[in-house]
Amino acid sequence: MPTNKTPETEIKAVLSTADHFAASGFKVSALLQAYHSQMKGELADILRYWMANAVDERHGGFFGKVDADNQIIADAPKGCVLNSRILWTFAAAYNRTSHRAYLKMAERAYQYLNAHFRDRKHGGVYWSVDHQGNPLSKRKQIYGLAFCIYGLSEFYAATRQDEVLDFAKELYYSIEKHSFDAQRGGYFEAFNHDWSPLEDLRLSEKDANERKTMNTHLHVLEAYTNLYRVWPDSQVAQQIHRLIDNFLTYIIDPETHHLHLFMDDDWTVKSRIISYGHDIEASWLLLEAAEVLHDAPLIEKVKKRAIQTAVAASRGMDPKGGLNYEWDGETHHLSDDKHWWVQAEAMVGFFNAWQLSQDQAFLDKSLKIWEYTKCHLLDKKHGEWFWGVTAANVPMPGEDKMGFWKCPYHNGRACIEISSRIERVVAV
């Protein structure tokens, strides 16, 4: 029956019926169609913002920073993570839509990464360059190499250029040669430019200085999963198996199902911080990794853990809306800011948990977080999403709109993931 309702009002109408709705099949179908429509529109809006604001026409590549007031900081350093995430996002958007403008942006990201971040002497990629493209920090952060592999694999899927896959393979071999712990499993965190030992291994100032971290393992797994899609090498498959086992054995707490964040060489846990965003992100990335291997027993094992980890993450849901940032088990302090990436990953992770369990409480959470995001995180004046909002739902002061960490990857990927998943569930 024709309706004058917009997709947004359809969502609100269904969600208003109950906190955990028991909707008819018709209502769920209409709800998913509305969600799908909004995800497609939001992806276009996000990418439009980056095409209009990120391109550095003077020095090449992309600006290193746009501040909270949407002002370009032209002389800001440029990070390999931001550049790699732009590469992945626009390549993935092109693979999804065949929109040539997205491929052009991905090509720009690839050329800049290849020309300015690639270390042709020692292998790997630099952590950062200055605004003119000169090496700034030459350290080899495995997290950074992983994101390069992730972006390169997606770009190769778009272009089938051998040089792109060769670059990704080179980074894979560098990680395996220098970072893989053949004795105890897992990957060491960081190295000097020449792969010699590094004293300060931290990814950022807020991280613990430990040799193994959940975050790096999660994104190596993510990268290897995408690499395996375009290069189904048996050794890559073996390493994906090992990484999944690392998570199931050492990283996911068997009692709480939260993730341990920092560990030493022997996997001894060194932190009691709970990161709700990483919990929910890992819940669906682990399953994605198992599925790419087509290993049925492993898939079933990971499905169970994915649901358990999603339930654990849901403990961070704020009754007023959104998913909180983290809980410190040492100080019993809740960080109740709502970061952009946490909401994006929660939208996907809870949707994935609903697909696995058919428990509509998970779908409810995914939709409610999107509603919260639309109300409080979307920058309706300048576009894109704010870094985050405080417990009072005002933008966190002093945070980037675009920068070393703030990128189109989490929210862009959420739009791609959810819209594609809905297409496999209902006719749209």
Image: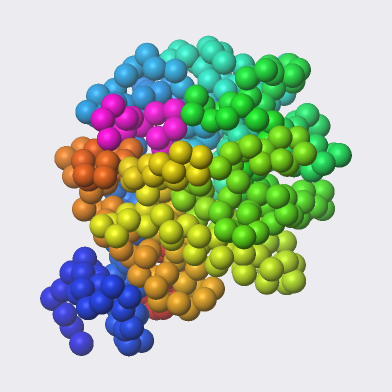
Q: Position of residue 148 (x, y in %)?
A: 59, 35
- Relative to 69, residue 287 above or below: below
Q: Position of residue 122 (x, y in %)?
A: 74, 19
Residue 282 visible within the image: yes
The foreground one among 151 and 205 is 205
Which range of residues does the magenta coloring cover? 396-410
- Relative to 132, residue 327 above or below: below
Q: How is the image coloured?
A: rainbow
The residue that appears at 56% across and 42% down in the rendered structure is: 272
Can you tell which quarter of the image residue 19 is in?
Answer: bottom left
260 lies left or right of 43: right
The residue that appears at 58% across and 39% down in the rendered structure is: 271
Can you tell which quarter of the image residue 409 is in?
Answer: top left
Q: Position of residue 263 (x, y in %)?
A: 67, 38
> Which residue, as the protein is rendered here, is positioned at the far front?
331
1 lies left or right of 208: left
Q: Position of residue 394 (x, y in %)?
A: 21, 41
Mark count: 0
- Relative to 106, residue 373 above or below: below
Q: Classify the position of the C terminus by image quarter.
A: bottom left
Magenta part mainly helix, strand or loop?
loop
The residue that appears at 46% across and 38% down in the rendered structure is: 331
Residue 397 magenta-drawn?
yes
Residue 43 magenta-drawn?
no
Can you tell which quarter of the image residue 253 is in?
Answer: bottom right
> Which residue, as the protein is rendered here, is positioned at the far left?
4
> Which residue, as the protein is rendered here, is positioned at the far right?
183
Residue 98 visible within the image: no
Q: Classify the position of the N terminus by image quarter.
A: bottom left
